[in-house]
Amino acid sequence: MKVVLDSNALQNINVFQSMTSANVMDCMDNSETIYFVVKGGGWRNPEAMRRMERIFGKRVRIYEFSEDPKTFIRRLAPDATEISIESGIAKIKVRNCFKPRIIGKDKSNLMIIKSLLKRFYEIEDVKII
């Protein structure tokens, strides 16, 4: 598990850790949202979340890391009804009404899920079924 962070991600992590004292493992962002992967608890402070969203000017999403990839996928996609991992491909089964939420606008959520799974578990692809 080797994660390479750029200077922007390091700055975001420093701000997040100073406000929540959580142990951040990874940070990714896109045009609308900043995603943090934390180890353990200690970050569930709604007031700090609102302050961070104002500071960053984006939505902030936080996911708790798990050594088990299925548990981590369940945290990334809580609407999943079934999760299976076979030869580097994660298959996430969701009801049709939740597929747009998992995939996201212009596949943005799906790309974040793929990136995080590739970084932490060497899962190369994600299929939404």
Image (cartoon, helix red, strand yellow):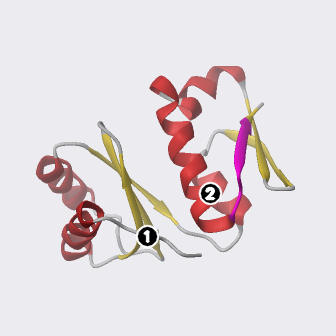
Q: Quadrant of the N terminus?
A: bottom right
Mark 2 residue type: Leu
Q: Which residue sits at x=27%, y=79%?
A: 21
Residue 44 picture quarter = bottom left
Q: Position of residue 96 (x, y in %)?
A: 70, 21
Q: Nearer the viewer, residue 96 or 45?
A: 96
64 to the left or right of 10: right
Mark 1 residue type: Val
**Vertical order, 85 against 122 (above or below):** above
Q: Nearer the viewer, residue 21 or 8?
A: 8
| Residue interval drawn in magenta | 122-127
Q: Quadrant of the C terminus?
A: top right
Residue under label 1: 4
Q: Nearer the viewer, residue 22 or 12?
A: 12
- Give the crowd class for mark 2: few <14, some 14-19, many >=20 residues within 10 Å: many
Image disc number at residue 117:
2
**Which residue extends farthest top?**
97
